[in-house]
Amino acid sequence: MQLLTKLFQVISQVAPVPGLSEKEAKLLSALNPEKFYIENVRSIMDISYANAFQICETAVRQGLFLRGVEVKCPDGAVAASANSEAELPEIVRCWHLEGGHYEAEELPTRDLQKSTFYRLNANSEPYRKSA
């Protein structure tokens, strides 16, 4: 819970918000500080997607969050993740059900959906002070 509390403190530092409600605390406790999405921030803070995006990107610029990108297989499974799209592999292995058993398939990353995610920057000054 300490990492999750720190995550909320970082978000609050970027965009001051009132204290955690019981609902927000429950949502925050389910959040993984190593990998979360704009939608997580939007939902916890009950704000628009655009505002949540702005909070996350401001935290990245301030060094509080790190941004990453993941590529997803057609079934939605994460095939690979990296710090930037340029660092993703050109080809990923995905699995699909064929004839009652799973078959591997290599797919070009450029043809697959990509998603941005964030994580707490463990090297940021505010994070080190509370750890």
Image (tube, helix red, strand yellow):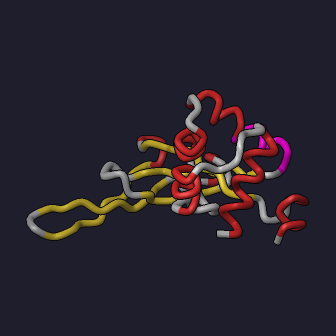
In the rendered structure, the answer to whether residue 28 lies left or right of residue 79 reads right
Please identify the residue farthest to the left as the structure is shown. Answer: 99
Tell me which corner region of the image, top left, top right, bottom left or bottom right, holds residue 124: bottom right
For the residue pair 40 and 121, the one nearer the viewer reads as 40
For the residue pair 93 and 55, the one nearer the viewer reads as 55
Provide the residue span drawn in magenta.
56-63
Residue at image location 82% in from the left, 72% down from the top: 131
Magenta-colored stretch includes residue 72: no
| Total marks in image | 0
Q: Is residue 24 above or below residue 45?
A: below
What is the x, y in percent for residue 58?
78, 38
What is the x, y in percent for residue 97?
18, 62
What is the x, y in percent for residue 35?
59, 58
Magenta-colored stretch includes residue 62: yes
Observer able to see residue 66: yes
In the rendered structure, the answer to whether residue 77 lies left or right of residue 40 reads left
Tell me which corner region of the image, top left, top right, bottom left or bottom right, holds residue 46: top right
Residue at image location 67% in from the left, 54% down from the top: 83
Residue at image location 64% in from the left, 61% down from the top: 33
For the residue pair 45 and 66, the one nearer the viewer reads as 45
What is the x, y in percent for residue 19?
70, 47
Residue at image location 52% in from the left, 58% down from the top: 26
Image quadrant occupied by the N terminus: bottom right
In the rendered structure, the answer to whether residue 17 lies left or right of residue 41 reads right
Observer able to see residue 81: no
In the rendered structure, the answer to whether residue 96 lies left or right of residue 28 reads left
Q: Main secondary structure of the magenta part?
A: helix
